[in-house]
Image: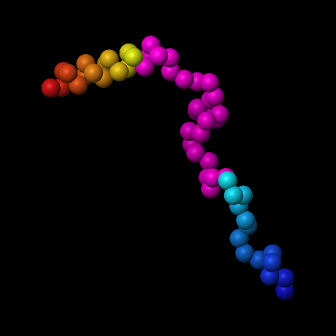
Amino acid sequence: MDYKDAGHIKQRANTPRHSEHNAKGTSKNPFGKGNTKAELLARMKAAAEARKAAK
């Protein structure tokens, strides 16, 4: 019997065990899709107002 072919398949050294559901470059998270600075500031201001109102 040739024992060298028995056992687990060797995985490449630098690859993940599974693919992420929101990995970069997929349909859910395409490359180049990012929030603009104005959108970010608007979200930050809204969150700050919500925190002020909660106090």
Please tell me which residue is depicted at 59% across the width and 39% down the height of the picture. Answer: 23
Which residue is situated farthest in the left direction here? 55
| Residue at the right extreme, as displayed | 1
| Residue 16 forms part of the magenta stretch | yes
43 versus 29 height, above or below: above
Q: Quadrant of the C terminus?
A: top left
Which quadrant of the figure contains the N terminus?
Answer: bottom right
Quarter of the image holding residue 31?
top right
User: What residue is at 58 percent from the left and 24 percent from the top?
Assistant: 33
Task: Give the image location of residue 40, x and y in percent.
Answer: 43, 19
Up-down: is 15 above or below 43?
below
Say whether residue 53 is left or right of residue 5: left
Furthest residue in direction front, as rendered: 13
Q: Nearer the viewer, residue 7 or 48?
A: 48
Magenta-colored stretch includes residue 11: no
Q: Which residues are magenta?
A: 15-40
Residue plotted at (65% across, 34% down): 25
Kindly report the secondary structure that dominates the magenta region of the rendered protein: loop
Q: Number of numbered discs present?
A: 0
Q: Is residue 31 left or right of residue 4?
A: left
Question: Could you tell me which residue is drawn at 58 percent across and 45 percent down?
Answer: 20
Residue 29 image-quadrant placement: top right
Query: Which colouring convention does the figure follow?
Result: rainbow
Image coords of residue 32 (percent x, y): 62, 24
Which residue sits furthest bottom? 1
Q: Position of residue 10 (x, y in %)?
A: 73, 65
Q: Position of residue 44 (x, y in %)?
A: 35, 21
Q: Is residue 9 left or right of residue 33?
A: right
